[in-house]
């Protein structure tokens, strides 16, 4: 396998769904299937109630193994973050009270294998580029149309957390994220989130602050297992991944979709998450449809 010189896409006829999904168990290609209808309805209910949907063992073990092998082969290119960030990935604002959420900074030590490092025949790329997958996720989210992200670095990366790593509290810059766990850490690595703690018109800083300073009554905890699928509305739900421990890294694939086909990360988001910004991040540094702090 060789690394792409630049991001590219598979056309639909090149992608065999049975390379990564058991179509008898998850017939997402069959719009007449009662099983598919049940999956979609269950995801919609969970997203409406909790801001998060979870389908165990969605990706076959053979495909997960190929993704794990790819991640280990290209892991040397992972950019390890070692920075202090607040939930909005903004700079400190000394005009605000010391206990304001925008002044709550934690150390982030996790890594990303950026999308432009994926191999030519990457299963993750095939999952991401499949029109069937896009349509299925759109129906689960009850949002449409959705698009593959124009973001060149973070459209479908692997997140890697090794022994002692932590991914602190944050909101996502994009509307929603799809996650596939590829490798479990020995301990830790739990996904914690506060569902819909803010809305497009309300930052709700008071409740955000209560979570940041240890209040757990609004939190949900999800311990993903290898092959599990998670669909998550991370723009409105504060979330983090707890400290990982042991020799096995936590590796999670993050195929990401948006409602605005022109959208990419803001420059400071790209720099905070993926280690650098590119000309496209500055060219498309547009106002969002909401007025939320990133």
Image (spheres, rainbow, N blue to C red):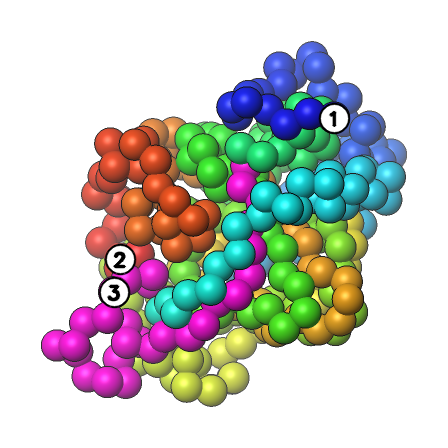
Q: Position of residue 178 (x, y in %)?
A: 58, 46
Distance of label 1 from label 3 (alpha carbons): 40 Å
Q: Position of residue 59 (x, y in %)?
A: 78, 42
Residue labelled with disc 1: 1
Residue 9 seen in the current view? yes
Residue labelled with disc 3: 91
Looking at the rendered structure, the secondary structure element under dot 3 is loop
Looking at the rendered structure, the secondary structure element under dot 2 is loop
**Label at residue 66:** none
Question: Does the magenta-highlighted stretch encompass residue 203?
Answer: no
Badge 2: residue crowd in 10 Å (few <14, some 14–19, many ≥20): some
**Label at residue 292:** 2
Work out whether residue 227 or residue 77 is closer to the camera in this orientation and state it: 77
Q: Main secondary structure of the magenta part?
A: loop
Q: Earlier in the sequence, mark 1 or mark 3?
A: 1
Badge 3: residue crowd in 10 Å (few <14, some 14–19, many ≥20): few
Which residue ends up furthest to the left in the rendered image? 95
Query: For the residues carrying marks 1 and 3, which lies nearer the camera in this image?
Result: 1
Q: Earlier in the sequence, mark 2 or mark 3?
A: 3
Tags 2 and 3 touching, CB below 8 Å = no
Q: Look at 49% across and 78% down and name the residue there.
A: 218
Which portion, as a residue range, is magenta? Answer: 87-115
Left or right, 22 with reference to 47: right
Q: Look at 44% across and 52% down and name the residue there.
A: 273
Point out the image quarter for the C terminus. bottom left
Distance of label 1 from label 2 (alpha carbons): 42 Å
Q: Look at 63% across and 55% down and name the residue there.
A: 160
The quarter of the picture where residue 111 lies is bottom right
């Amino acid at each position: 396998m060789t690394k792409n010189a630049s991001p590219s896409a598979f056309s639909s006829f090149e992608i065999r769904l049975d390379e990564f999904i058991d179509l008898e168990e998850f017939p997402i290609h069959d719009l007449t299937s009662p099983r598919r209808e049940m999956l979609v309805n269950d995801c919609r209910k969970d997203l409406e109630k909790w801001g998060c949907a979870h389908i165990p063992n969605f990706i076959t073990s053979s495909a997960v193994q190929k993704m794990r092998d790819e991640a280990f082969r290209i892991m040397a290119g992972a950019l390890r973050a070692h920075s202090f960030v607040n939930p909005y990935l903004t700079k400190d604002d000394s005009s605000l009270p010391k206990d304001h959420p925008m002044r709550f900074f934690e150390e982030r030590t996790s890594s990303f294998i950026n999308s432009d490092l994926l191999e030519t025949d990457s299963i993750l790329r095939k999952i991401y580029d499949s029109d069937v997958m896009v349509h299925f996720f759109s129906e689960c989210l009850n949002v449409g149309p959705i698009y593959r992200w124009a973001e060149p670095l973070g459209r479908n990366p692997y997140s890697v957390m090794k022994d002692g790593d932590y991914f602190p509290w944050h909101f996502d810059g994009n509307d929603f994220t799809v996650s596939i766990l590829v490798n479990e850490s020995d301990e830790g690595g739990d996904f914690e989130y506060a569902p819909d703690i803010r809305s497009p018109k309300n930052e709700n800083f008071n409740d955000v602050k209560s979570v940041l300073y240890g209040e757990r009554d609004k939190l949900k905890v999800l311990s993903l297992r290898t092959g599990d699928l998670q669909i998550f509305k991370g723009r409105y739900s504060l979330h983090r991944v707890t400290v990982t421990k042991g020799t096995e890294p936590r590796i999670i694939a993050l195929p990401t979709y948006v409602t605005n086909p022109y959208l990419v990360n803001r420059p400071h988001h790209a720099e905070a998450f993926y280690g650098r910004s590119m000309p496209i991040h500055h060219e498309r540094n547009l106002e969002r449809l909401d007025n939320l702090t990133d």
